[in-house]
Amino acid sequence: MFKNIIDFSDFNKIDIRLGTIVEAIDYNELHKPSILLKIDFGDEIGIKKSSAQLRNNYSSQELINKQIIAVVNFQPKQIGKIISEVLVLGLPDDNNEPILVMPNVILKNGVKLY
């Protein structure tokens, strides 16, 4: 049995959208170095920033033009000297390092997960 059962209405409050990474820069200012991402979520949401600890599995350059999914309606979070505006979603590999959740076909930026 699952511990934290929620109503479907609670899930519907989470806005998960598809976006394309348009810029990725190594960010070394944190205890665990990360990558600063700029992600295009389409006309409705626009370009948002996120700091993600992805450097064990990705280089900044290889992330450019990749489509990912992210939660876009959390409160922005201060991470070091930057504000992370969205939460990029991933799954842990065997070393507990994130692997990004990405579609296997190109879709329109901003499309909502359902």
Image (cartoon, rainbow, N blue to C red):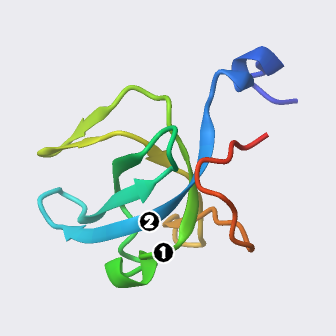
**Which image quarter: residue 12?**
top right
Residue drawn at x 44%, y 76% as measured from the top left: 63
Residue name at image x 35 percent, y 83 percent:
61
Residue at left offset 50%, top offset 29%: 73
User: Callout 1, which amino acid?
Assistant: Asn
Q: On the rendered structure, is 59 left or right of 70?
A: left
Q: Are marks 1 and 2 in contact (CB under 8 Å)?
A: yes
Residue at the image point whose x is 75% and y is 25% from the top: 3
Q: Position of residue 31 (x, y in %)?
A: 18, 57
> Residue lying farthest right?
1
Q: Residues within 10 Å of mark 1 (few under 14, many from 20)?
A: some
Q: Position of residue 83 (x, y in %)?
A: 23, 40
| Viewport quadrant of the N terminus | top right
Which is nearer the N-term, disc 1 or disc 2?
A: 2
User: In the displayed structure, does residue 37 sit left or right of residue 16?
Assistant: left
- Residue 106, by quadrant, is bottom right
Residue that label 1 marks: 65
- Alpha carbon separation for disc pair 1 and 2: 5 Å
- Look at the numbered disc 1 and give the secondary structure of its residue: loop
User: Residue 21, labelled with which disc?
Assistant: 2
Q: Give the residue type that dot 2 points to.
A: Ile
